[in-house]
């Protein structure tokens, strides 16, 4: 068997890289810190047999058509909204992702953002940096408590389940959720209740988005939706920035129609450093670091490598998106 060529479109943790090398693949890595663009990706994948894709460069019809030797695209992410799966099917290229292994780390990030928004933590931190910590009046920059309140999960999958677990255990929160189809297993673990989207908006003190970005969820959280939320509600998004309308979010926060927001994902990414969200008291923003822990990124790289190895050994793929 001739040596298979694996192109890796960004630096990845050593664990996955070592596994591929140890199995005898010819691994070619994109050697720049700069995000690879589509032309460069096509040029590198034209003769490759596998792509391990660690950055969200669009993989569309043109890409799959041009890269006719590809036998697998292994994504180093759970999200796959940047991949045209119908085009992958047309060219018979299996696409895999890395769900599950990143659920806890991503939920940690959602929890962190929720707490930070409720206590204005990022703004308080900036106050110190800006030399504004002089006195603490009893009425200064007060937060709100979440203990015993209601968490509304939009998209209860594995990440939502972990977020629900933490909110339940740590803060004794009641869990409600909205999915297109019920997740009965998670309902049992969390003692959670499925509610309509309208009821989710009416009842939640925190709404945490954990859905995939699809035609149905794109722009779902817009001005009308934010207006329907409780006046003390906190909006958390760790899935994809395009699920919320950022201009609408800015204006409802400026109008103080909801309490605050915590975002790990923005639209666009990277966010501009002069985005008003970065200067609001009740808003916490992070640069899409949901799964960015040493442990999780290692697991993701291993899973991505194992999918490639399974493909070339004619074994069942561990996490295939287009069977
Ligand atoms: C994921 O895995 O989808 C994370 O959001 C990183 O893109």
Image (cartoon, rainbow, N blue to C red):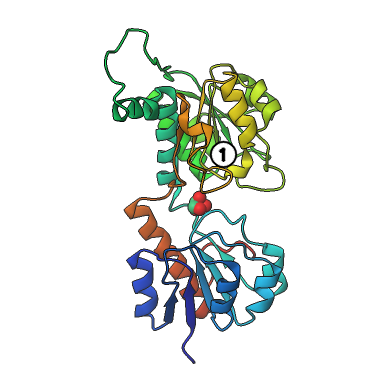
Residue at the image position 51 percent from the left and 32 percent from the top? 277
Rendering coords of residue 41 (x, y %) = 56, 72
Find residue 180 and report its image quarter.
top right
Residue sitting at the far top: 138
Residue under the image location 63 percent in, 73 percent down: 93
Residue 7 picture location, percent across and down: 48, 75
Residue 23 versus residue 150 in the image, above or below: below
Quadrant in the rendering for residue 31: bottom left
Camera sees residue 92? no
Q: Mark 1 vs ligand 1: CB under 8 Å?
A: no
Instruction: Return the residue nearer the eye: 163 or 126.
Output: 126
Q: Could you tell me residue 85's position as x and y percent?
A: 67, 63
Query: Is the residue 180 above or below the residue 248 in the image?
Result: below
The reply to whether residue 278 is in sight is yes
Count the labels in the image.
Answer: 1
Image x and y of residue 198, in percent: 69, 25
Which residue, as the protein is rendered here, is positioned at the far bottom? Answer: 1
Residue at x 31% of width, y 21% of height: 132
Q: Residues within 10 Å of mark 1 (few under 14, many from 20)?
A: many
Look at mark 1 in the image and give the residue it sits on: 156
């Amino acid at each position: 068997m001739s040596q298979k060529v694996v192109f890796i479109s960004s630096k990845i943790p050593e664990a996955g890289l070592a596994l591929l090398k140890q199995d005898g693949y010819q691994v070619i890595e994109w050697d720049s810190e700069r995000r690879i663009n589509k032309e460069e990706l096509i040029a590198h994948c034209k003769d490759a047999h596998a792509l391990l894709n660690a950055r969200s460069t669009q993989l569309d019809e043109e890409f799959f058509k041009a890269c006719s030797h590809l036998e697998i695209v292994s994504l180093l992410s759970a999200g796959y909204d940047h991949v045209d799966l119908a085009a992958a099917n047309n060219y018979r290229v299996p696409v895999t992702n890395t769900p599950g292994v990143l659920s806890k780390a991503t939920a940690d990030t959602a929890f962190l953002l929720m707490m930070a928004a409720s206590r204005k933590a990022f703004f308080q931190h900036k106050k110190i940096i800006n030399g504004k910590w002089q006195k603490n009046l009893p009425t200064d920059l007060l937060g709100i408590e979440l203990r015993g309140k209601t968490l509304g999960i939009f998209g209860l999958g594995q990440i939502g389940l972990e977020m629900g677990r933490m909110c339940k255990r740590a803060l004794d929160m009641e869990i409600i959720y909205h999915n297109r189809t019920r997740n009965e297993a998670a309902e049992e673990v969390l003692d959670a209740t499925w509610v309509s989207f309208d009821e989710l908006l009416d009842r939640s003190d925190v709404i945490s988005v954990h859905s995939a970005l699809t035609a149905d969820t794109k722009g779902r959280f817009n001005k009308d939706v934010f207006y329907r939320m409780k006046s003390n509600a906190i909006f958390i998004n760790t899935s994809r920035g395009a699920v919320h309308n950022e201009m609408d979010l800015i204006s409802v926060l400026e109008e103080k129609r909801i309490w605050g927001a915590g975002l790990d994902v923005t639209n666009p990414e990277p966010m501009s450093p002069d985005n008003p969200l970065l200067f609001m008291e009740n808003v916490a923003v992070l640069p899409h670091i949901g799964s960015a822990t040493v442990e999780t990124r290692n697991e993701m790289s291993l899973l991505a490598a194992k999918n490639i190895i399974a493909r070339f050994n004619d074994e069942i793929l561990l996490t295939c998106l287009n069977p």
